[in-house]
Image (cartoon, grey):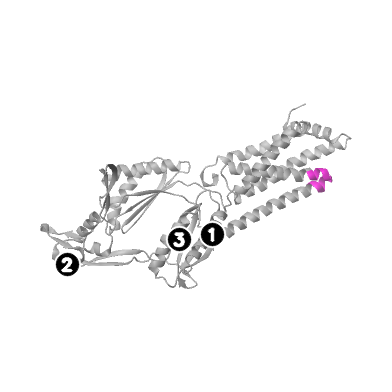
C-alpha cells in the first residue's frame, strides 16, 4: 500500500485536526494584520542627488556641478540610467538602478561617489543631499486648507509647520507634499548703478553673503569642567540684520548691503496653485510608506485631521480626493468574486455527485484551505491587493478539482458497500499520490514566475 498524506491523515486524524486548527488560527490573526492596498508593493531602487546654489545660472550649474556628479555616478555598479534637471539655483540628478540592486547598497554607493568628488565641486554650493526615492504610487488622500482670517503667508506656514508636523507623526505616512500657497523669500535687489559706483559685482556680493550667513561646527571644547560641542552661529535672524551686513569693497573699503540695493521680506514666485470651488486654497497630499495599508493610514490621517480641526476651528480642513475608495472597491469586489467562486464550486459538487456528505466536505475543505494562506501571505510580507486576492481565487478552482476527484472516488467505494472509514482509506490509497502529482505539476508551472525579474516579477 502506497503512503500518501491523505491516507496518513485518515489513519491519524488528531494530528491533522490540530495542525489545521493552528493554521486556521494563524490565518485568522494574519488576515486582520494584513495591509490592504490597491496594488502590490514594488521596490524600484532610485536615488536622487540634489545640489543647491542660490542665484547660480543653469548653464553654470550644469558644467560645474551636474556633469561632475553624472560622471561620478556612472561608475557605480548597478546603474540602469540617470537623468538630471537643472534650473536656476538647483541641480537634481535622479539615478535608477537595476531592480535586483539592493536599495541600501545603492544609496551608500552614491553617497561614496559624491564624497569622492566633493572637493571638485564649487565651495559656494550647499552640501549635496543624497536621498532614496520610494515609489508607492499616487497619494492616498488629499486635503485642502482654507482660512479667511489668515493671509496666504500665514496659511502656508500653518500647513507647513502645524499640519505637516502633525501628520508626519502618523504611523505609515511616508511623504506630505504641499500644493498652492506661498513660500517666504528674503529678496536682495541690487542696484546696478550703485554696484558700478562702488566697484563691486553681483557675484562678489553673492559670495560674501553666502560666506557670512552660515552656521558652522566649531568642534568641541571644555567649558565649566565639561566637554561641550561648539557651534558658530552666523546666520542672520532678521531682515534688518541681513541689510546691515558689511560687504567688502576693493581697496579695503566696506559698505552695508542696503547701500547696494534693497532688502525686502516678501514671497517667492508661486510654482504651484490649488483651488477649490473657484477659490484659492492650500492643498496637501499624503502618501503612505512601503508596507503600510492604504485604509489604515487614511483612517489615521483622518483622525489626526479631526484633532487639528478641533484645535484650530478658524481653519477649514476638507478632504478633496481619496484613493482609498478605489482600493476598498477593488478589495470588496475581489472578495465577493472569491466567495461567489467558492459557492459555485460547492454547487457543482452537489449537482454532479448528488451527495450531501460530499458537498459538506467540499464546503468545509475550501475555507480550511484558504484561511491558512493568509498566514503565508503575511509571513512573506505581501498585502491584500488585487493580484494576491485574484491568485487565491484561481487556486480555489484547483482545490475544488482535487476535492472532487478524491470525493468521487470515496463515494464510489461507499457504493460498493464499504464503511466510510474503509472507503476513504482505500480511495486515498488509490489516487492520493496521483492527485498530489497533479497539484505539484501545476505548482511547477507557476514556480518560474516567482523568479521573474522586473516590475512584473515583483
Task: Indicate the quadrant where residue 368 lies.
Answer: top right
| Stretch in magenta | 349-360
- Give the CA separation, mark 2 to mark 3: 44 Å
- Give the CA separation, mark 1 to mark 2: 56 Å
Disc on the earlier residue, 3 or 1:
3
Disc on the earlier residue, 2 or 3:
3
Instruction: Tell me the number on the disc at residue 194.
Output: 2
**For residue 175: magenta?**
no
Measured along the vertical axis of the image, is residue 432 above or below residue 232?
Answer: above
- Name which residue lies at 49% across and 46% down: 43
Q: Nearer the viewer, mark 2 or mark 3?
A: 3
Left or right of 402 on screen, residue 142: left
Instruction: Tell me the number on the disc at residue 163.
Output: 3
In depth, the one of 403 and 220 nearer the eye is 220
Query: Circle 1 is placed at which residue position?
Result: 303
- Give the CA separation, mark 3 to mark 1: 13 Å
User: Residue 447 placed where, x, y %?
Assistant: 60, 38
Q: Report crowding for label 3: few under 14, some 14 to 19, many 20 or more residues within 10 A (C-alpha).
A: some
Measured along the vertical axis of the image, is residue 288 above or below residue 314?
Answer: above
Mark 1 secondary-structure assignment: helix
Most common SS among magenta residues:
helix
User: Residue 376 placed where, x, y %?
Assistant: 61, 41
Q: Mark yes or no: residue 129 visible.
A: yes
Q: Report crowding for label 1: few under 14, some 14 to 19, many 20 or more residues within 10 A (C-alpha).
A: few
Instruction: Tell me the number on the disc at residue 162.
Output: none
In depth, the one of 179 and 310 nearer the eye is 310
Amino acid at each position: 500500500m502506497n503512503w500518501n498524506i491523505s491516507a496518513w491523515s485518515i489513519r491519524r486524524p488528531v494530528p491533522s485536526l490540530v495542525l489545521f486548527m493552528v493554521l486556521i488560527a494563524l490565518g485568522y490573526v494574519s488576515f486582520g494584520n494584513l495591509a490592504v492596498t490597491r496594488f502590490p508593493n514594488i521596490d524600484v531602487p532610485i536615488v536622487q542627488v540634489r545640489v543647491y546654489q542660490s542665484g547660480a545660472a543653469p548653464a553654470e550649474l550644469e558644467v560645474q556641478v551636474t556633469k561632475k556628479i553624472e560622471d561620478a555616478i556612472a561608475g557605480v555598479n548597478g546603474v540602469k540610467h540617470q537623468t538630471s534637471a537643472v534650473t536656476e539655483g538647483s541641480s537634481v540628478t535622479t539615478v535608477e538602478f537595476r531592480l535586483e540592486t539592493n536599495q541600501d547598497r545603492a544609496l551608500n554607493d552614491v553617497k561614496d561617489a559624491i564624497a569622492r568628488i566633493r572637493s571638485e565641486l564649487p565651495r559656494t554650493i550647499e552640501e549635496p543631499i543624497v536621498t532614496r526615492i520610494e515609489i508607492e504610487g499616487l497619494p492616498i488622500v488629499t486635503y485642502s486648507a482654507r482660512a479667511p482670517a489668515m493671509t496666504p503667508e500665514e496659511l502656508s506656514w500653518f500647513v507647513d509647520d502645524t499640519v505637516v508636523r502633525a501628520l508626519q507623526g502618523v504611523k505609515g505616512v511616508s511623504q506630505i507634499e504641499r500644493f498652492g500657497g506661498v513660500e517666504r523669500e528674503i529678496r536682495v535687489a541690487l542696484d546696478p548703478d550703485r554696484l558700478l559706483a562702488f566697484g563691486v559685482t553681483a557675484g562678489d556680493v553673492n559670495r560674501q553673503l553666502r560666506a557670512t550667513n552660515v552656521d558652522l561646527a566649531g568642534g568641541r571644547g571644555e567649558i565649566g569642567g565639561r566637554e561641550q560641542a561648539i557651534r558658530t552661529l552666523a546666520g542672520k535672524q532678521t531682515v534688518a540684520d541681513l541689510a546691515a551686513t558689511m560687504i567688502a569693497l576693493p581697496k579695503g573699503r566696506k559698505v552695508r548691503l542696503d547701500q547696494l540695493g534693497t532688502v525686502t521680506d516678501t514671497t517667492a514666485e508661486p510654482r504651484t496653485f490649488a483651488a477649490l470651488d473657484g477659490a484659492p486654497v492650500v492643498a496637501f497630499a499624503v502618501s503612505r510608506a512601503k508596507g503600510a495599508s492604504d485604509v489604515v493610514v487614511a483612517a489615521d490621517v483622518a483622525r489626526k485631521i479631526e484633532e487639528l480641526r478641533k484645535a484650530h476651528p478658524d481653519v477649514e480642513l476638507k478632504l478633496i480626493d481619496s484613493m482609498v475608495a478605489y482600493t476598498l472597491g477593488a478589495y470588496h469586489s475581489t472578495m465577493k468574486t472569491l466567495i461567489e467562486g467558492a459557492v459555485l464550486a460547492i454547487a457543482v459538487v452537489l449537482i454532479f455527485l448528488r451527495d450531501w456528505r460530499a458537498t459538506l466536505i467540499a464546503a468545509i475543505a475550501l475555507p480550511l484551505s484558504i484561511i491558512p494562506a493568509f498566514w503565508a501571505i503575511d509571513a512573506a510580507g505581501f498585502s491584500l491587493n488585487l493580484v494576491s486576492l485574484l491568485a487565491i481565487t484561481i487556486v480555489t478552482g484547483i482545490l475544488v478539482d482535487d476535492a472532487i476527484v478524491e470525493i468521487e472516488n470515496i463515494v464510489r467505494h461507499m457504493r460498493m458497500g464499504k464503511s466510510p472509514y474503509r472507503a476513504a482509506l482505500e480511495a486515498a490509497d488509490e489516487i492520493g499520490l496521483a492527485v498530489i502529482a497533479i497539484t505539484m505539476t501545476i505548482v511547477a508551472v507557476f514556480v518560474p514566475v516567482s523568479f521573474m525579474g522586473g516590475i512584473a516579477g515583483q
